[in-house]
Structure formats: C-alpha cells, structure tokens
Amino acid sequence: MKYDLPSAAQPLKIGTRGSLLALAQAHETRDRLAAAFDLPAEAFQIVPIKTTGDKVLDRPLKEIGGKGLFTREIEDAMLTGAIDIAVHSMKDMPTLQPGGLVLDCYLPREDVRDGFVSPHFAALADLPEGAVVGSSSLRRRAQLAHVRPDLKLVEFRGNVQTRMKKLDDGVAVATFLAMAGLHRLGMPEVARSAISPDEMLPAVAQGAIGIERRSEDVAVAAMLEAIHDGPTGQRLMAERAFLAALDGSCETPIAGLAELEGGTVRLRGQILRIDGSEALSDMASAPIEDGAELGRSLAAGLLARAHPGFFDWREG
C-alpha cells in the first residue's frame, strides 16, 4: 500500500522534551528519516514539549510520580494529534504504553556506560572518604552506597549544563552522566572516565532512543520500520521484560544490560536496596528469540533470592 510522505506543506511532527539532549535525539531521528526517504528537513517539524519532570527540579523524582513524568504530556499530545511521533530516551520510559500508542522503533544504541564527572578527581576510586557526590538516580545512588558507603550522597537533578554548574558551585565534587548523552551532545570529554558495566551496571535501556507512534497510524509505522535497528530492539526486549517483571520504577534501584553474542542474548541484572546495604546480581543467556522470557526468568530468580520487604526501605 502506498502512502503520502510528509512534506513542507504537511510536515511530520516530532514531539520531544526541550533539553539540548532531547533535541539532539529528535534531530537524529529527523535526519535518519530524511535520509531514508530522501526528504528535506522542512518535511519535519520538531515540537518541544515541557513535561512535569522538566518543570519540577527541586524534588526527587520518586516524590512526584516516577518514570511517566518525562513522557505523559508528550504522549497526551500524540493521542490528541498535536504530534505524530515522539522521541524518547528509553531509560525514562515506563514498560507499558497508554492505549492507542505503540513503541516498536529503536535507533542504534549508543555507549551504555555511566560517565564519572568531576572537576577535581579522575575516577571514582580517587574520591576521598566522605566526599560529596550528586545524583538524582536511585540506581546510581544505591550502587555507589553499596561499594562506597563512606561517601555522602546528595540530590542532583537537571540537564547536563545545570549539573555542571552545580559542580562548579561546589554543591558536590562529582556526579555521573550517561556517556550516550555526552556523545550525542558532542561533549564526551566532560566525563573524566567511563565506568565499566562490570563496576556499575547501567540502567535498563540506557543509551537507546525509542520512537513512539499511534498504533493505527500505518503510514508512520511504515516510515519508522525503515530506521528501526533490529539488534537494539532485541536487546531491549530482554531488558524491558526484566524491568517489567520487577515492576521497575524510579522508586526501585534496578540495573540491567543485554548483549548479543551470535544467536544468543546474554542478560545481566541487578537489584539493590535503596540504601545500598544489599545488592543481588545474576546473569543468564538464551536464544535471541527468547529474550523476553529470559528477562522475566532472570527477574523471577532475583526476586526469589530477595527477602520480603527488600524494596520497602525508603530514603529519609
């Protein structure tokens, strides 16, 4: 079936958050679609949308609603027809989409590692006892508290530029940023070092961009199919099934990383208590086509090892 492609007169509207990183991801999506269909940039319109997570910066995410804070307003705009597709950082995405929306297009995954950022120290191991480290990520905070309980952890939200200013102002001596975001911004040098997943397992879907659409929009579905990266989709199938089985949210420290080896997917997973006092990890492999079942099975194994109330402790 033939569909009309977008044009300058009727552009495809791409919804995104308004940060520099989110806009870079939207531009990458636009450029890939333009190249795939030999379309001018004017055939696309990037529509920045401010989400609740972007508006409320003075409170931890867990206090104001979790992962949906970075997607809800964008998804509402898509359901009303104000935009045609939405570009998301996949680590921000809930495991379930609202009725009428589907998420089945992923761009090639970037560097999955966390970057260590500090004006004073070159690596995590160099931090002195009692050093103040800023992060808004419960996963990073729990992992850090587990390996370095001597450090003082403080809330640290905002975009890359905001966090860098907080470091300059002395709010903390170090923080973490995803290497993928720094690469997409052309700022990899901001990280003094990249942390191996063996030392700090990344967030589920870290480094991946997902593109959401209306489920009945077959023309858009056909366009997105042309830029979908299959291996990234296979990896995220396992990781997001793992997260869903753990009922993962911004209130639960969970890490996971799937890697492809021939026809096999290898999944590493970790759950932690919020204070870092306990951490449980496991790894398993399966044929790529069984990735979702692998994710659910790994999650079930970790939950079976966790005592009742493992996730119940809350900071503060």
Image (cartoon, rainbow, N blue to C red):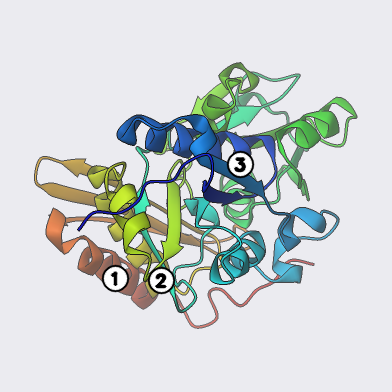
Q: Which residue is painted at 56% across and 31% down in the image?
A: 115
Q: Which residue is painted at 90% across and 29% down in the image?
A: 169
Are there few (<14), some (14-19), or many (20+) residues within 10 Å of tag 2?
some
Mark number for residue 14?
Answer: none
Kindly indicate whether the residue at mark 2 contacts the one at mark 1 (C-beta within 8 angstroms): yes
Q: Mark 3 or mark 1: which comes first in sequence?
A: 3
Q: In this rendering, does residue 267 appear at all?
A: no
Depth order, front residue of 130/117: 117
Amino acid under disc 2: Ala
Q: Which residue is mark 3?
A: 22
Q: Position of residue 76 (x, y in %)?
A: 61, 70
Name the image quarter holding the N terminus: bottom left
Depth order, front residue of 123/251: 251
Kindly indicate whether the residue at mark 3 contacts the one at mark 2 (C-beta within 8 angstroms): no
Q: Secondary structure at mark 2?
A: helix
Q: Position of residue 194 (x, y in %)?
A: 51, 26
CA–CA distance between discs 2 and 3?
Answer: 24 Å
Q: Secondary structure at mark 1?
A: helix
Q: Which residue is mark 2?
A: 244
User: Residue extending furthest right?
Assistant: 169
Name the image quarter holding the C terminus: bottom right
CA–CA distance between discs 1 and 2?
Answer: 8 Å
Q: Which residue is mark 1?
A: 296
Q: Position of residue 172 (x, y in %)?
A: 81, 35
Which quadrant would residue 238 be assigned to in this image?
bottom left
Q: In this rendering, does residue 152 appear at all?
A: yes
